[in-house]
Amino acid sequence: MDEKSKKEVIQKNVEMLISDDFFNALWRESVGGNAGENCACVNAIVDKRTGEIVDFSNQPIKDWLNTKAKRKGIKGEAENYDKASIIVDLSYTSKEKLFSTNIEDCYPKITKLVGAKNYESLKRAVEKANEIYRSKIGGQVKKLREEAYKK
């Protein structure tokens, strides 16, 4: 894959990681358990050839291809897809952390990728998505703090 194509895949992955689809999948997951304390896990379907996230699903790939993928117009063979588990730390939601003076405490953060060792484009997209989460959530936290101190 050429450099331009790699950048396009990274950008598409960033868009997927900040999309409503990602957050809808995230909020349907339980917090804790195998993902870890204050964490939840979203399973991504990844194109093995490019490392591009094509969907989020807990279904086995063959079942996903026959159901949700068909509805979305995604085609291909099961061997062309892989799953990557995206672990997200949600500890920023506690009241103590919401008003923390440490901005690092105040945004969701993808802390781990499982099953994505060979997907450099996915790893780089995670770094960029974390930067976006930090800037967006950081701004919201700043506004909340300012409003809290006005009263």
Image (spheres, rainbow, N blue to C red):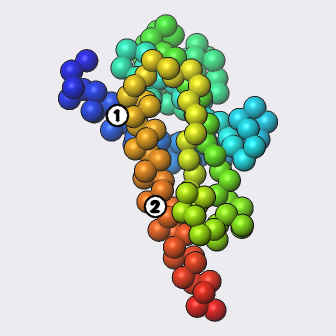
Q: Quadrant of residue 58?
A: top right
Residue 16 screen position, x and y as percent: 44, 39
Residue 42 screen position, x and y as percent: 61, 35
Q: Secondary structure at mark 1?
A: helix
Q: Out of 31 and 36, give the one closest to the viewer.
A: 36
Q: Is residue 76 above or below residue 103?
A: above
Q: Secondary structure at mark 2?
A: helix
Q: Is residue 114 above or below residue 26?
A: above
Q: Earlier in the sequence, mark 1 or mark 2?
A: 1
Say which residue appears at 56% left-offset and 30% top-offset: 113
Q: For this view, does 35 lie left or right of residue 119?
A: right
Q: Dividing the image into 4 quarters, which one contains the C terminus?
A: bottom right
Q: Out of 99 and 56, give the one closest to the viewer.
A: 99
Q: Is residue 50 above or below residue 25?
A: above
The residue beneath circle 1 is 10
The residue beneath circle 2 is 136
Q: For this view, does 128 lie left or right of residue 92?
A: left
Residue 22 screen position, x and y as percent: 53, 42
Could you tell me the amino acid type at mark 1? Ile
Q: Dividing the image into 4 quarters, which one contains the N terminus?
A: top left
Residue farthest along the bottom direction in this orientation? 151
Q: For this view, does 82 lie left or right of residue 12?
A: right
Say which residue appears at 69% left-offset and 43% top-offset: 39
Say which residue appears at 79% left-offset and 36% top-offset: 33
Report crowding for label 2: few under 14, some 14 to 19, many 20 or more residues within 10 A (C-alpha): few
Say which residue appears at 27% left-offset and 33% top-offset: 7
Could you tell me the amino acid type at mark 2? Lys
